[in-house]
Image: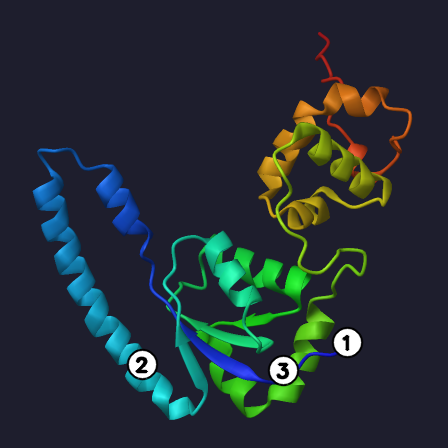
Amino acid sequence: MEINSDIINVLTKDFSFVKTTLENSTIDSISKSLKTLTVALNQYEKSISSMKANSCNDRLNTKFIPYFNSGQMLQEIKELSEDIILLSGIDQSLDDFNDIKQKAWQRYKKIVVGDDHRDMVTTYTKIYIDMFIAANPRNSQLPIALERYSVDPELRYAKFVELVNKNFSMKDIAVAFGLSIPAVYWVRKQFKMQLLLDPDVNKKAKAMKFNCQKRKVATV
């Protein structure tokens, strides 16, 4: 599997609160909201300046990308020419970071690395790539750069059936659709009767295992 060893340093900060604050403001509270945002953004300016100063020591190409949500960040990562992304500014313990890391690898063969592994990936790049590939096998059937599908029910159903018949797990289908796993279960629920009645659907596929076992009734 060909992975270029070029590394880019991506600095980010979560700016999603700006949209949320403004949306939740009323005509009476907008002035206070703007003052609150001003204080927060001034603090961000200091934090970003510090991150930039620290990144200069790496002698790597550095780019700042504001963070609004995982989907937006994933799209930004997709457009980068480098295959190894050192992502700073997102808490690695959050689901968002893990979501970005997983989907960037499965869809675009991009290796997203947090601050914890920064030194190793910059010092032993080839070894880190080999270790990452070994620890994170990709599903070869998943098309690279598979985008979020149209909300057209017929198109979504057709694509869902295609992946079911390829024996994709619900997790793999979630990655393919660019959705969370709970969202894909919701999609399947909407199509349940259609899937069960459709003669072209492999009823023995992994994604067709509905929890339909009858609950045991206790006997006295």
What residue does disc 3 label? 128
Distance from disc 2 to disc 1, alpha carbons, whole Å, reads 33 Å
User: Dot 3, how many residues are within 10 Å of its Cα: few (below 14), some (14-19), or many (20+)?
Assistant: some
Disc 1 packing (10 Å; few <14; some 14–19; many ≥20): few
Front label number (1 vs 3): 1
Q: Is mark 2 on a helix, strand or loop?
A: helix
The residue indicated by pointer 2 is 52
Q: Image quadrant for the N terminus?
A: bottom right
Which one is earlier in the sequence, the residue at label 1 or at label 3?
A: 1
CB-based contact (under 8 Å), mark 1 and mark 3: no
The residue tagged with tag 3: helix, strand or loop? helix
* Residue under pointer 1: 1
The answer to whether residue 22 of the structure is visible from this angle is: yes
Q: In which quarter of the image is residue 53?
A: bottom left
* Badge 2: residue crowd in 10 Å (few <14, some 14–19, many ≥20): some
Label 3 is placed on what type of residue?
Answer: Tyr
Query: In the displayed structure, would residue 161 be above or below residue 138?
Result: above
Percent x, y for residue 170? 71, 42
